[in-house]
């Protein structure tokens, strides 16, 4: 199966230490050894946030802040590359073409962000579409997609499955509330809706959940068109 995994930075590198990254590398190596083709996009997490907040205080503009965010995602990607040793392409690809070439060579491309103005979930969604992935996994810090933000709405319920259009509607509603965090950002949800990809939103704080998503036994949210 061809699988693209978009891993949140706060999931892969909640703090700059090796344990979580090593656990992710071990799951990816297992999937690779089982014959799956893999592409990964890594988010910025707390490292990106700290740099962005500091640079904002120093007067950086939004594009400069995004550039710092991209740099942080690529540092996080390099941690995973270090853990995967020679199974990973040695440099985080700058664009989707380079990532696709790595996949064709049989390497695992580990991307970070690409250009200012979007997010790694969007980069991952575009990569999945570009390489015609069978499955796109969003490894997030929440157990799946809820009908409201579970942090502010305790009675929110989780979807076991939904269509990409329903995901867009939920994300729009959540993003309207200041300070709330959607499990997948709106741009990624719109790209997903356009692509028709099969996707899953899972709690990636347990790296084994990625293997369960590939097996189809995860307990997050499946996203697919209803034909
Ligand atoms: P992320 O996509 O990782 O956002 O990029 P995030 O909300 O911090 O996600 P988690 O915490 O990793 O799950 C971090 C920042 O990098 C910039 C944006 O500023 C984003 O907020 N970025 C990222 C870009 O400008 N372009 C990209 O392609 C990716």
Image (spheres, grey):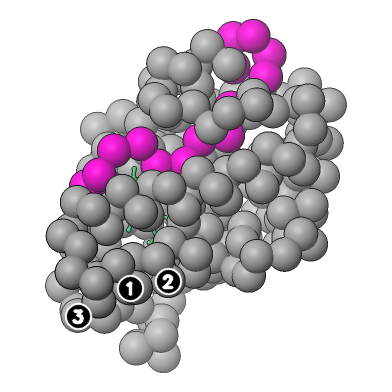
Measuring 20% from the left and 63% from the top, which residue is drawn there?
60
Membership of 107 in magenta stretch: yes
Measuring 38% from the left and 47% from the top, which residue is drawn there?
70
Q: Nearer the viewer, residue 214 or 48?
A: 48
The mark that comes first in sequence, 3 or 2, is 2
**Which residue lies under the disc numbered 2?**
50
**Image location (x, y in percent) of residue 30:** 83, 36
In the image: residue 23, left or right of residue 227: right
**Image location (x, y in percent) of residue 125:** 39, 37
Image: 193 above or below 151: above
Image: 103 above or below 59: above
Chain part drawn in magenta:
103-119
Contact check, label 3 and label 2, Cβ < 8 Å: no
- Pointer 2 local density, CA inside 10 Å: few below 14, some 14–19, many at least 20: some
In the image: residue 117, left or right of residue 224: left
Figure quadrant of residue 227: top left
- Judged by its main secondary structure, the magenta piece is loop
**Image location (x, y in percent) of residue 207:** 71, 55
Asked which secondary structure carries label 1, the reply is helix
| Quadrant location of the N terminus in the rendered image | top right
Asked which secondary structure carries label 2, the reply is helix
Membership of 78 in magenta stretch: no
**Which residue lies under the disc numbered 3?**
178
């Amino acid at each position: 199966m061809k699988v693209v995994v978009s891993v949140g930075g706060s999931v892969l590198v909640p703090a700059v230490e090796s344990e979580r990254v090593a656990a992710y590398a071990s799951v990816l190596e297992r999937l690779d050894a089982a014959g799956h083709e893999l592409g990964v996009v890594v988010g910025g997490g707390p490292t990106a946030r700290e740099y962005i907040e500091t640079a904002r205080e120093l007067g950086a503009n939004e594009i400069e802040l995004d550039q710092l965010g991209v740099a942080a995602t690529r540092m996080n990607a390099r941690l995973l590359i270090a853990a995967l040793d020679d199974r990973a392409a040695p440099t985080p690809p700058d664009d989707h073409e380079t990532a696709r070439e790595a996949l064709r060579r049989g390497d695992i491309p580990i991307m970070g962000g690409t250009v200012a103005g979007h997010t790694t979930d969007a980069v991952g969604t575009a990569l999945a579409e570009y390489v015609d992935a069978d499955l796109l996994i969003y490894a997030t810090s929440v157990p799946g997609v809820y009908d409201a933000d579970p942090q502010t709405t305790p009675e929110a319920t989780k979807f076991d499955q939904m269509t990409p259009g329903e995901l867009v509607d939920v994300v729009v509603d959540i993003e309207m509330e200041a300070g709330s965090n959607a499990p997948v950002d709106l741009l990624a949800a719109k790209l997903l809706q356009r692509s028709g990809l099969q996707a899953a939103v899972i709690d990636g704080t347990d790296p084994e959940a990625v293997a369960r998503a590939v097996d189809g036994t995860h307990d997050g949210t499946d996203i697919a068109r209803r034909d």
